Structure formats: C-alpha cells, structure tokens
Amino acid sequence: PGLASASCNLAAVLFVVGSHEKVEERLRSMLAQRMAAYGGSHAATLEAAQELLTFLYLGGRHADAEQLADQIYELRDSTLGPEHPFTLMAVHNLALIHSALGKKSNAEIFMRNVLQCRETVLGLCHPDTLTAMRWLAFLLGALSKHEEAEAVFRSARERHTAALGAGHPLALVALHN
C-alpha cells in the first residue's frame, strides 16, 4: 500500500507539472501491478482503475474513459451488487461520461437509476443522494426539461435545508442552484 500510494502521489505531481504522458504511463503501470498482484475485482485494483478513469476524464479523453468506466461498473456490479455505494458511484461516473460525450439521454437514465437506488439504500437526505439530485437536475436542464430540472433543484434544496440547516454550506450551494 505504501508504494502504491507513493506511485499515485507521483502521478499527481506529474499531472500538475504537465507531464501527462508520464502520468498515464504511471497510472497504467500501477493498474497492471495491482491486476497481477490482486486480480481484476480486488478493491485495490478497482481503485487504481478509478484513478486512471479520473485522469482520462479530466484529460478530455471521454471515449477512453467510457470503456474503462464500463469495465469498472461491470466488476463492481458483479462483485458488490447493483445497490452497493461503489457500484452506484460507477453508474454515476458513467452518467457524467455519457453527458460529456453528448449522450445526455443515456446520462439521464443512469442518473435516475443512481438517484432511485441512493434514495432507497442511503436515504432521502444523504449527501450522495443529494449530489445525484443536483446532477440529475443539471442533466434535465441540458436536455431542455427546465420545469422538471427546477423541481428537482427545489426538492434538493429542501432536503439540504432539512438535513443540514439553512446556513450549512451545502444547503447554501443548493439554494444557489
């Protein structure tokens, strides 16, 4: 774990200084090492895959990110089940990537699924549930479903305020949205 953490930290430094090829090389190497040591479905391997996914997404390589996100989702779903928080995060990531690829209708379907599961599993006022609500509202706005987007934003704001209080920073963000 210490070496893996150091490798991840090195990748972050390389990213900041603009050595993107070296970052990708480092992240792919870390993923390969974990795959060899632990297998494809181990939490440490999936963590390394998530690091690479984040790099690809932030680098604008959304098609590459989509392929990796699909793999991560399949592994999380088969090992943890469809309602596990890590599986739901994988679906959330797919929604973000599909949105970035212009597949906003697909993204909406993914995000509605995430929201429904998070409401059931985590509760109506859990921070992850509220995050899914905000992202769904943004997607609805991008799809010109403005009335529904506004209703979802309002509901998220009400839940934030009820759960955290009117002055909490997340409640204020919800109010701003």
Image (cartoon, rainbow, N blue to C red):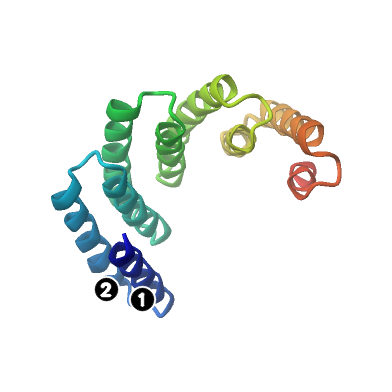
- Looking at the image, residue 163 sits to the left or right of residue 110; the answer is right
Q: Quadrant of residue 3?
A: bottom left
| Quadrant that contains the N terminus | bottom left
The residue tagged 1 is 14
- Any part of residue 117 in sight: yes
| Residue 129 position within the rendered picture, expressed as x and y whole percent measured from the top left | 60, 32
> Residue pushed farthest left?
36
Q: Residues within 10 Å of mark 1 (few under 14, many from 20)?
A: some
Q: Nearer the viewer, residue 79 or 105?
A: 79
> In the structure shown, which secondary structural element does the residue marked by tag 2 occupy?
helix
* Residue occupying image coordinates x 38% and y 78%: 18
- Looking at the image, residue 101 sits to the left or right of residue 165; the answer is left
Q: Nearer the viewer, residue 23 or 153?
A: 23
> Residue pushed farthest front?
2
> In the structure shown, which secondary structural element does the residue marked by tag 1 occupy?
helix
| Residue 56 position within the rendered picture, expressed as x and y whole percent measured from the top left | 34, 57
Label 2–label 1 contact, CB within 8 A: yes
Vertical order, 162 against 38 (above or below): above
N-terminal label among 2 and 1: 1
- Identify which amino acid the numbered label 2 is placed on: Lys
| Residue 126 position within the rendered picture, expressed as x and y whole percent measured from the top left | 64, 32
Vertical order, 8 against 118 (above or below): below
| Residue 151 position within the rendered picture, expressed as x and y whole percent measured from the top left | 73, 27
- Identify which amino acid the numbered label 1 is placed on: Leu
* Residue occupying image coordinates x 36% and y 24%: 81
**How many discs mark residues in the rendered view?**
2
The residue tagged 2 is 22
Q: Residues within 10 Å of mark 2 (few under 14, many from 20)?
A: some
Vertical order, 144 against 43 (above or below): above
Q: How far apart are labels 2 and 1 at the CA level?
A: 7 Å
- Any part of residue 103 in sight: no
* Residue occupying image coordinates x 40% and y 37%: 90
